[in-house]
């Protein structure tokens, strides 16, 4: 990814020359953080709990499961009431999208001073 496409109040999105993109956004509307998503897990298009650098996380999207097309969403908690999500879209190499979303989430945690 090499072109900053837009910035907003809670995150940023980057789009690469080949059409792939990554977006990182802080979810401030859910006051109970990632646990708000856990309560909705059965209504999500996909839900797979995991960890990122020791922090609780879950792959999941409420709209659709686009992983086979290269669209992967990873939600990562940094406190009891705050989480961010990474959406990585890589249609040219769909099998790598979730791995790259995890790498981006780990980079965010590292930049915040986490492990």
Image (spheres, rainbow, N blue to C red):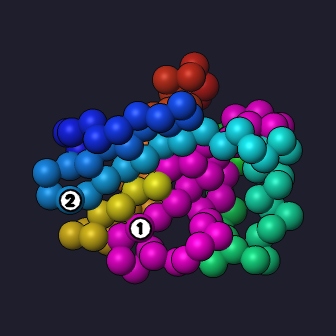
Task: Indicate the position of residue 88 as horizontal and vertical percent values.
Answer: 40, 56
Residue 71, quarter of the rendered image: bottom left
Identified at 61% across, 39% down, the residue is 26
Task: Indicate the position of residue 68 as horizontal and vertical percent values.
Answer: 40, 80
Viewer can see residue 106: no
User: Secondary structure beneath disc 2?
Assistant: loop
Q: Is residue 88 left or right of residue 11?
A: left
Identified at 20% across, 59% down, the residue is 19
Numbered tag placed on residue 109 in the rendering:
none
User: Secondary structure beneath disc 1?
Assistant: strand
Q: Is residue 18 above or below residue 60?
A: above
Q: What is the spatial separation of the Cα atoms under label 2 and label 1, in whole angstroms?
A: 12 Å
Q: Over which residues does the magenta segment extend?
A: 57-86
- N-terminal-most mark, 2 or 1: 2
Give 64 or 95, whichever is nearer the viewer: 64
Mark 2 packing: few (<14 Cα in 10 Å), some, or many (20+)?
A: few
Q: Is residue 90 above or below residue 53?
A: below
The secondary structure that most of the magenta stretch takes on is strand
105 drawn magenta: no
Q: Is residue 81 above or below residue 88?
A: above
Identified at 27% across, 36% down, the residue is 4
Q: Name the residue under label 1.
A: 71
82 drawn magenta: yes
Numbered tag placed on residue 19 in the rendering:
2
Q: Is residue 12 left or right of residue 26?
A: left
Viewer can see residue 39: yes
């Amino acid at each position: 990814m090499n072109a900053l496409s837009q910035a907003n109040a809670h995150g940023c999105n980057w789009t690469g020359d080949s059409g792939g993109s990554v977006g990182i956004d802080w979810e401030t509307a859910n006051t109970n953080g990632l646990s708000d998503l856990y309560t909705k897990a059965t209504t999500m298009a996909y839900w797979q709990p995991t960890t990122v650098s020791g922090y609780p996380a879950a792959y999941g999207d409420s709209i659709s499961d686009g992983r086979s097309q290269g669209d992967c969403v990873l939600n990562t908690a940094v406190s009891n009431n705050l989480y961010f999500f990474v959406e990585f879209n890589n249609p040219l190499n769909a099998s790598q999208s979730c791995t790259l979303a995890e790498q981006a989430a780990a980079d965010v945690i590292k930049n915040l001073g986490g492990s």
